[in-house]
């Protein structure tokens, strides 16, 4: 087996606020192989974005990486200087945000921005850089790229802007892309177009991808592997087909069960009671305890992530092992 | 029994004028051919909703769903057309009757936070309108508010709190309690669960379904989420750039869609059952509503477009019992 492109081990990213220490990411481990897509799912506040920001080196004070390692092609990103990180970012690792204006500069023409990005990491002529920009726009399905290069971001629709942001992320053929809910704000037909392009890209270029989303249906179609986060921790991970067909963790089970298409039309949806606890005030033991239908006395002891079935890990004392319990 | 439908829209149109900016006005005065731009947000829509029905309204951003919903709720007047409530033209009502009628339709919005006054306590948010409109009768204010809160799944013990002290799901419950406190019989939900997490979304959808039974409510349920609409609705209406392109009972829309746009839309929706599958793709972008394509608005993106589609607007007509579609292919 070849080494994975990315291996995150026991990552801890904490925010040291006046109200207390927010353990936004608390002991997260996963790896992403070459050309693979890993779906990172969870509800808002579960720590998905902070995980992505930690990898790409964008965690700002009062937050910082408090422990663990982020091995990217053998190097620990958690230990790099800001300068070394800047050199990697946009070059071998790129990020796509939910809001494409995090990437785009509103006052610069698209060609200016793209050419600058190319030249930031590569010694090429302006003409070569322009050619690269044009090719990349074509790659993400932007029609008449020559014309589009001369436009400003505000002249594009939301979907087009996101495509340009994706094109910018692809300029240097990164080995890893961290995509944080990049299609959440888009219409379904536009989302479908972008997902199709992304799927093609990963298959043809060998780029690895972390796709952050709260939408299990997107992960189902796009990703190879999935990691489910709850209250700053991964509670279950494994191959998409296995996790979605036979979830082990009661939270994953509940999430899948509450997707409308998994329920009989018109009947009450199976629902997870209650809501996510505050990270400043987590219950003792399993963080899901107050909402979990399988909780017992034993869950007051904190469950650890364990291999419950071959290749299947979950953080639970009473996992769903019975095949008849499919969500 | 009243035979008239609960709601009937006849040729409802809403236009918005985009006023010229300063440079535009100067240019116009100098004789340049610039005009004020007009958006046909809703273009001659006909729609009937019967008592007790849940009608889902779907379509992509900017197709006119919210504009239609606001007209139904009486908070935006149509430019043209007639709105009948139980057979009565609402324009014909005045004074107390008009106010009474307006209360009977309430709207629930996507962003509960933006629609709740941050400086009001929950008890006043929920109880103010019923008090002003004299709905409390003998009931004490406190008891009435408690009942409304409990029904929406909120602990009345929190009634002296402010909106910011609640989570997103709880705020949506406050919005629901407020809307129901004036005893409406018709609810317009505009993306009411779009901002909520999956597990909270399921709780709120269940609440909507329970309230429908308990209070005999009728819903116009606006959403871009086809999974949610399929689960909840009896009938589904699909809009594209201001026009209704297809309408049928839920089963038919999802099993036997007729309109090419409906089919494209359904194909684009990611489904949890699909694994590592090529996403199917509708070509092109949604055109600007300022300058929609002539003929069938969908023709630049339609895989089946013909010459005729570029010039002639297809009529929405019945193609099977209870199924209406606006596509020239049905003429062949
Ligand atoms: N007050 C207004 N002034 C000018 N144009 C408007 C106004 N309100 C809506 N529009 C335009 O009317 C069209 C329909 O808007 P509407 O908000 O009804 O769409 P929608 O279907 O609800 O979209 P979304 O899914 O994004 O909520 C859009 O082109 C919009 O820009
Ligand atoms: N700058 C910050 N200061 C304090 N807490 C933060 C900060 N940024 C994020 N957090 C906290 O970290 C947790 C995880 O956030 P995030 O990764 O953004 O969640 P997600 O992307 O899964 O919705 C949340 O509880 C959030 O409030
Ligand atoms: S450890 Fe216990 S409380 Fe936590 S998810 Fe498993 S069964 Fe539920
Ligand atoms: S009328 Fe023509 S362009 Fe419009 S949906 Fe039908 S076939 Fe396609
Ligand atoms: Mg996030
Ligand atoms: Mg809207």
Image (cartoon, helix red, strand yellow):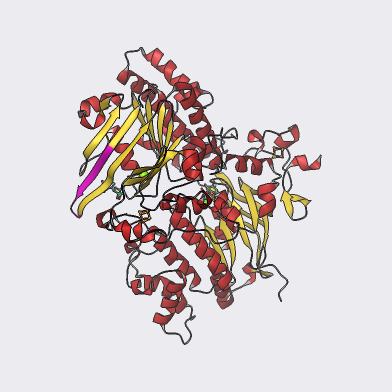
Q: Position of residue A22 (x, y in %)?
A: 24, 50
Name the foreground residue: B39 vs A120.
A120
> Is B282 part of what is drawn in magenta?
no
Q: State the image quarter where residue A299 is shown.
A: bottom left
Q: Which image quadrant for residue B140? A: bottom left
Seen at 25% across and 33% down, the residue is A69
Q: Position of residue B104 (x, y in %)?
A: 56, 71
Q: Residue at x 44, y 65 (%)?
A: B173
Q: Residue at x 51, y 55 (%)?
A: B191
Point out the residue furthest to the bottom here: B138
Q: Can I make out residue A199 in this image?
A: yes
Image position of B121 (left or right of A264): left
Residue B20 visible (yes or no): no
In this view of the protein, which residue sits in the foreground, B51 or B226? B226
Does A12 appear in magenta? yes
Q: Is residue A216 above or below residue B207?
A: above
Give the left or right position of residue B175, taking residue B268 as reference: left
Residue furthest right in the image: B332
Q: Nearer the viewer, residue A140 or A283?
A: A283
Relative to A40, is A71 above or below?
above
Query: Mainly helix, strand or loop, the magenta region?
Result: strand
Q: Residue B43 at what x, y percent from top left?
A: 64, 50
B320 is higher (above) or lower (below) than A198 = below
The residues colored magenta run A10-19
Answer with the quadrant where ligand 4 appears in the image.
top right
Which residue: 31% across, 19% down?
A121
Decide if residue B51 is on the left or right side of residue A62: right
């Amino acid at each position: 087996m070849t080494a994975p492109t990315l291996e995150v081990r026991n990552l801890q990213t904490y925010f040291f606020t006046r109200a207390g220490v927010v353990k936004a990411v608390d002991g997260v481990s996963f790896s992403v192989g070459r050309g693979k897509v890993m779906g990172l799912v969870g509800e808002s506040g579960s720590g998905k974005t902070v995980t992505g920001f930690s990898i790409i080196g964008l965690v700002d004070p009062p937050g910082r990486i408090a422990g663990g390692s982020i091995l990217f092609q053998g190097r620990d990103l958690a230990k790099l200087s800001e300068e070394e990180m800047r050199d990697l970012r946009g070059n071998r690792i790129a990020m796509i945000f939910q809001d494409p204006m995090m990437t785009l500069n509103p006052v610069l023409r698209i060609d200016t921005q793209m050419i600058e990005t190319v030249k930031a990491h590569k010694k090429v002529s302006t003409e070569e850089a322009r050619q690269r920009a044009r090719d990349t726009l074509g790659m993400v399905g932007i029609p008449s790229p020559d014309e589009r290069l001369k436009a400003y971001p505000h002249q594009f629709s939301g979907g087009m802007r996101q495509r340009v942001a994706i094109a910018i992320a692809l300029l240097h053929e990164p080995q890893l892309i961290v995509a944080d809910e990049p299609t959440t704000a888009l219409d379904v037909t536009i989302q479908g177009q972008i997902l199709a392009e992304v799927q093609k890209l990963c298959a043809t270029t060998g780029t690895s991808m972390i796709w952050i989303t709260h939408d299990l249906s997107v992960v189902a179609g796009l990703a190879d592997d999935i990691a489910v986060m709850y209250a700053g921790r991964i509670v279950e991970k494994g191959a998409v087909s296995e996790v979605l067909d036979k979830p082990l963790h009661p939270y994953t089970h509940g999430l899948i069960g509450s997707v409308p298409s998994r329920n009989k039309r018109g009947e009450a949806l199976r629902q997870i009671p209650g809501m996510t606890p505050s990270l400043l005030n987590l219950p003792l033991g399993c963080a899901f305890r107050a909402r979990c239908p399988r909780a017992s006395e034993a869950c007051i002891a904190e469950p650890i992530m364990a291999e419950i079935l071959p290749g299947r890990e979950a953080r639970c004392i009473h996992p769903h092992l019975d095949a008849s319990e499919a969500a | 029994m009243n035979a008239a439908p609960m709601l009937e829209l006849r040729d409802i149109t809403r236009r918005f004028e985009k006023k010229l900016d300063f440079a535009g006005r100067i240019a116009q005065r100098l004789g340049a051919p610039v005009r004020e731009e007009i958006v046909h947000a809703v273009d001659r829509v006909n729609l009937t909703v019967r008592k007790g029905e849940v009608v889902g309204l779907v379509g992509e951003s900017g197709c006119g769903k919210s504009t239609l919903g606001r007209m139904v709720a009486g908070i935006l007047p149509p430019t043209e057309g007639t709105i009948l409530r139980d057979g009565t033209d609402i324009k014909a009502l005045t004074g107390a009757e008009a106010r009474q009628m307006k209360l009977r339709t309430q709207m629930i919005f996507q962003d509960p936070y933006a629609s709740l006054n941050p400086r009001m306590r929950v008890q006043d948010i929920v109880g103010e309108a019923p008090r002003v409109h004299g709905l409390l009768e003998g009931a004490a204010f406190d008891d009435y508010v408690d009942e409304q809160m409990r029904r929406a799944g909120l602990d009345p013990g929190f009634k002296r709190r402010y909106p910011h002290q609640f989570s997103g799901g709880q705020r949506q419950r406050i919005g629901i309690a407020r809307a129901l406190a004036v005893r409406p019989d018709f609810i317009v939900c505009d993306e009411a669960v779009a901002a909520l997490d999956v597990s909270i979304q399921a709780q709120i959808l269940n609440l909507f379904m329970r309230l429908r039974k308990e209070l005999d409510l009728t819903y116009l349920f606006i959403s871009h989420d086809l999974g949610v609409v399929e689960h909840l609705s009896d009938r589904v209406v699909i809009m594209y750039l201001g026009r209704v392109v297809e309408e049928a009972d839920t089963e038919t829309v999802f099993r036997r869609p007729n309109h090419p746009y409906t089919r494209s839309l359904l194909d684009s929706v990611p489904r949890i059952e699909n694994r590592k599958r090529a996403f199917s793709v509708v070509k092109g972008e949604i055109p600007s509503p300022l300058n929609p394509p002539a003929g069938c608005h969908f023709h630049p993106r339609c895989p089946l477009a013909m010459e005729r589609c570029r010039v002639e607007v297809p009529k929405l007509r019945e193609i099977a019992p209870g199924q209406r579609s606006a596509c020239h292919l049905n003429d062949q």
